[in-house]
Image (cartoon, rainbow, N blue to C red):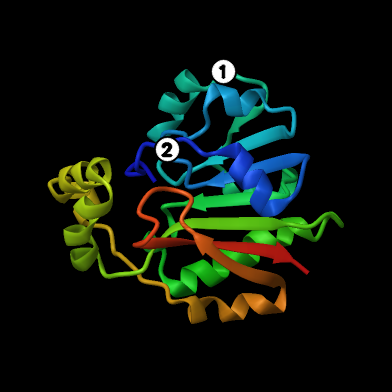
Amino acid sequence: MIFKYNFNFNIKLIQSLVKTKQLKILDFGCGTGAWSRNDLKDKNIKKITLYDKNKKLIKILKKKYNYKKIEINFDLKKIIKKRYYNLVIMSSVIQYINHNEFRKLIKIIFQNKKRKKEKLFIIITDIPKLPRPFEFFLIPIFSLKRFVFALVMLFNEEYKKLNFYLYKKEDFDFLKENFKISFTQNIHDLKYLRYTLILKSK
């Protein structure tokens, strides 16, 4: 999503969550990119595929990332069929996907895993706990930077058109058929307002 809050992933934290050394990553909803140069120097990262629905981001990402480890690919069908990954990260994305579409998306992503015996991890982070209006008034208590960002988004016409969906923990019960599920604190800021879901394939 182009509206992603500007932050960098903590690759050490991610490695501790999934306990996998050789990471082939699909960053689903990559926005303008949250991978620092130090992340890309990490020997455990073998490949990162950046995907987003917003094709306007391709030019921005190509300018930002000129590394062999980074692939910018906005064709999800080709990614599923021709690319292999063992970690999918969805950051600040799920709140813009309705529940039915999310079920379909997980099914599509899981299809890739079936071509390999290696475990598939999915980290879904920055999941809101509260409706957008309630969260908005609480954000400045926890993060002024994020509040300024949210304030700017209030006046963005494209952002205002997006639907916002809440997910309770029980909404993920359907995943238990194929994944072991665990929840942890948000790997962004807003640790009391948002949370992270970690999925490990069975």
Instruction: Please name the residue that numbered disc 2 is placed on.
Output: 55
> Which residue: 41% across, 52% down?
92
Q: Position of residue 138 (x, y in %)?
A: 21, 60
Label 2 element class: loop
Viewer-nearest of discs 2 and 1 = 1
Residue furthest to the right: 117
Is residue 16 toward the left or the right of residue 95 in the image?
Answer: right
**Residue in front for this viewpoint, 93 or 108:** 93
Q: Position of residue 70 (x, y in %)?
A: 62, 28
Residue 61 shows in the view: yes
**Residue in front for this viewpoint, 46 or 181:** 181
> Which residue: 41% across, 63% down?
97
Up the image or down, 100 lies above or below 66; here it is: below
Is residue 12 toward the left or the right of residue 147 in the image?
Answer: right
Is residue 154 toward the left or the right of residue 8 in the image?
Answer: left
Q: Position of residue 132 (x, y in %)?
A: 24, 64
Quadrant hosting residue 24 = top right
Quadrant hosting residue 152 = top left
Label 1 element class: loop
> Which residue: 74% across, 34% down?
44
- Quadrant (top left/top right/bottom left/bottom right) for the C terminus: bottom right
The amino acid beneath tag 2 is Lys
Up the image or down, 103 lies above or below 162; here it is: below
Answer few, some or many: residues within 10 Å of disc 1's Cα (few below 14, many 20 plus, some between 14 and 19): few
> Which residue: 67% across, 21% down?
68
Q: Which mark is residue 52?
A: none
The amino acid beneath tag 1 is Asn
Q: Position of residue 17 (x, y in %)?
A: 65, 53
Q: What is the CA distance from the residue labelled 2 to the residue labelled 1? A: 18 Å
**Residue in front for this viewpoint, 124 or 72:** 124
Q: Which mark is residue 66?
A: 1
Residue 80 shows in the view: no
